[in-house]
DNA sequence: CTGGGTAAC
DNA sequence: GTTACCCAG
């Protein structure tokens, strides 16, 4: 047997060994988490609501939000994007309305007019296009934040489309979105709506035995960089916002998933 | 898809 | 306030 042949065979065995060991580790983690007892899946529309730092959580029929009166916008908007929600139906955009469910008074859309900023949806209209009611419900001023147009139609739009891609690929994801309402911020309009300097999104895919998370923190400016450059750990976002995103998860699982800034398991193709 | 604006009724 | 049309990233 030639020397080259021996090396080739050896290399193949080493490769198989490495792959086998990785597979073993994945199975071990899966078994570990299963043995911890994952809570039975219930209606995720309420199951995965984050905590509120403002004490004003509002439930609409197709999404929920926590309103921050100081900044006249939501600190988070949360909803489940099921695969069955994905739709290309095109409804005419209605006018934005003041969300009457906000006890402290939500911002008026006029505060955005001629501000130079978009009325940027937090729960995108494109994620609620499965019915006229759900679509129109996203046009509440409690569901928008001032966004630069280049940002909104640029990298932010890219992320929203990627999430629709994932919702289709992974049979639905749960989404939490908001601006970082911290530090020095410009304000616009009579309502003094704060203009966040960063926006975030947190996703959880709970459709498999082992849930997976991914979080993004993106500066409020357009970028041509790949989306995975903006991945952060959920822990980072929680430290930044004071929000506990997945308090319902078993602590062991929560701690393990939220500490990770890996985007393993999320396809960026 | 993400949004903007203006004119006329 | 609402509807129609035109615009850009």
Image (spheres, coloured by chain):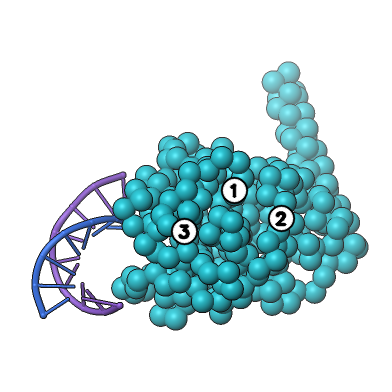
Chain colours: A cyan, B blue, C purple
Q: Pointer 1: residues within 10 angstroms few (<14), some, or many (20+)?
A: many
Q: Is residue A104 visible?
A: yes
Tell me if A122 is positioned left or right of A213 in this view: left
Of residue A84 and residue A92, the one placed in the foreground of this image is A92
Q: Chain of mark 2?
A: A
Q: Chain of mark 1?
A: A
- Looking at the image, residue A74 lies above or below residue A225: below
Tell me if A108 is positioned left or right of A17 in this view: left
- Looking at the image, residue A114 lies above or below residue A97: above
Circle 2 residue: A243
Q: Residue at x 46, y 58 (%)?
A: A191
Label whose residue precedes the other's in the sequence (2 or 1):
1
Secondary element at image label 2: loop
Of residue A205 and residue A236, the one placed in the foreground of this image is A236
- Looking at the image, residue A28 lies above or below residue A250: above
Q: Pointer 3: residues within 10 angstroms few (<14), some, or many (20+)?
A: some
Q: Pointer 2: residues within 10 angstroms few (<14), some, or many (20+)?
A: some
């Amino acid at each position: 047997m030639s020397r080259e042949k021996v090396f080739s065979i050896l290399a193949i065995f080493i490769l198989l060994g490495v792959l086998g060991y990785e597979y073993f580790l994945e199975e071990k983690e899966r078994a570990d988490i299963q043995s911890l007892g994952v809570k039975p899946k219930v209606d995720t529309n309420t199951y995965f609501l984050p905590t509120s730092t403002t004490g004003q959580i509002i439930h609409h029929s197709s999404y929920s939000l926590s309103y921050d009166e100081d900044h006249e916008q939501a600190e988070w908007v949360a909803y489940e994007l099921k695969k069955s929600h994905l739709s290309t139906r095109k409804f005419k955009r209605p006018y934005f309305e003041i969300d009457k469910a906000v006890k402290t008074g939500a911002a008026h859309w006029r505060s955005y007019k001629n501000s130079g900023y978009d009325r940027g949806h937090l729960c995108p209209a494109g994620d609620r296009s499965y019915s006229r009611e759900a679509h129109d419900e996203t046009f509440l001023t409690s569901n928008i934040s001032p966004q630069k147009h280049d940002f909104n139609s640029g990298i932010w739009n890219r992320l929203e489309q990627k999430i629709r891609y994932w919702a289709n690929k992974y049979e639905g994801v749960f989404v939490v979105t908001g601006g970082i309402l911290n530090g020095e911020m410009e304000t616009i309009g009579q309502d003094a709506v704060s203009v966040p300097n960063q926006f975030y999104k947190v996703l959880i895919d709970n459709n498999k035995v082992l849930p997976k998370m991914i979080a993004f923190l993106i500066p409020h400016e357009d970028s041509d960089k790949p989306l995975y450059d903006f991945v952060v750990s959920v822990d980072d976002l929680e430290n930044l916002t004071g929000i506990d995103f997945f308090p319902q998860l078993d602590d062991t699982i929560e701690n393990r998933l939220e500490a990770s800034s890996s985007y393993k398991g999320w396809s960026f193709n």
